[in-house]
Amino acid sequence: MSTAELHTLTGAYALHALPDDERLAFERHLGACEACAQEVRELSATAARLGLAVSAVPPPALRDRVLREITTVRQDAPSHQRGSRAAASRGRAGRWPTYALAACVAAAAAFGGVAVWQNQLAQDARQEAARAQLHNERVAQVLTASDARTSASDLAGGARGTVVVSKSVNRAVFLASDMAPPPGGKVYQLWFDDEGTMRSAGLMNPSASDDAVLLDGPVDTASGMGITVEPTGGSDHPTSDPVALMDFQDA
């Protein structure tokens, strides 16, 4: 994707409407493009104002009125014909073999189980989408901060790493491009450099060569960051030589 095309994605990014590959490409561009960062800030603020403008708070008396009127609504009584059919049906049901009734109960239980399973899947998907949106919003908050500062470095194997730090937000984002996958059973772990003491800042997605990672925890007084290869799940302290070390001196 060309730089000119990336400049056109500010609106879609502000509305969280980009697919993952375009979002990652735009976030790498956003870390180094103040014009786009400013436009995203303005569009995000406008979208928030528009959302508030169309929201409506129900009047306090609405609930009481609905509950009061429910008591005045009468349900239609079943007609004589419907009553006759229901009685006939009940008579036939009483003559069904026991195994047929048991089969119906089993089928109802099965369908009920499927409904619960489907509902759980939908709920999990909603929660995952909410987590992804929250992550994207936090990444964007750092990348578009007015005091965001960027440092970039070439990494091993032709990879490229960019770290964006905002003192006002007190967070940092690491943008990786063309990272080689870690060895089997291993993962890339990020670290804050607190005056020589390495503080864990989260794990990278081992299956993503391009990634935007919001570092865990505040930047505080960290002077830089590092990347090491650690066992799956991460380590309390670095156990290998650093893959990369990046200073925040320009950030």
Image (cartoon, rainbow, N blue to C red):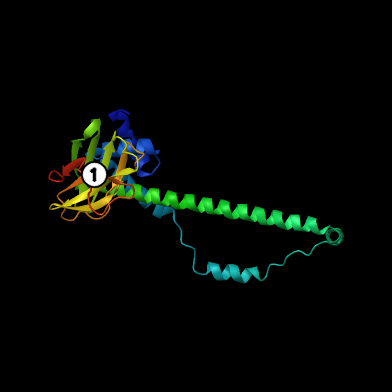
Q: Where is residue 226 in the image (x, y as percent from the top left)?
A: 20, 45
Residue 217, placed above or below residue 74 = above
Q: In which quarter of the image is the C terminus?
A: top left
Q: Which residue is drawn at 83% across and 57% down?
A: 97
Q: Disc 1 marks which amino acid?
A: Thr
Tally of marks: 1
Residue 181, placed above or below residue 237 = above
Residue 80 image-quadrant placement? bottom right
- Residue situated in front as seen by the camera: 4 or 240: 240
Q: In which quarter of the image is the N terminus?
A: top left
Residue 88 image-quadrant placement? bottom right
Specify whether residue 144 is in view: no
Q: Residue at x 12, y 45 (%)?
A: 249
- Residue situated in front as seen by the camera: 155 or 37: 155
Q: Which residue is drawn at 28% across and 41% down?
A: 39
Q: Name the residue under label 1.
A: 228
Specify whether residue 223 is in view: yes
Lateral position of residue 150 relative to residue 181, left or right: left
Q: Mark 1: which secondary structure?
A: strand
Q: Position of residue 216 (x, y in %)?
A: 28, 53
Q: Which residue is drawn at 25% across and 33% down?
A: 159
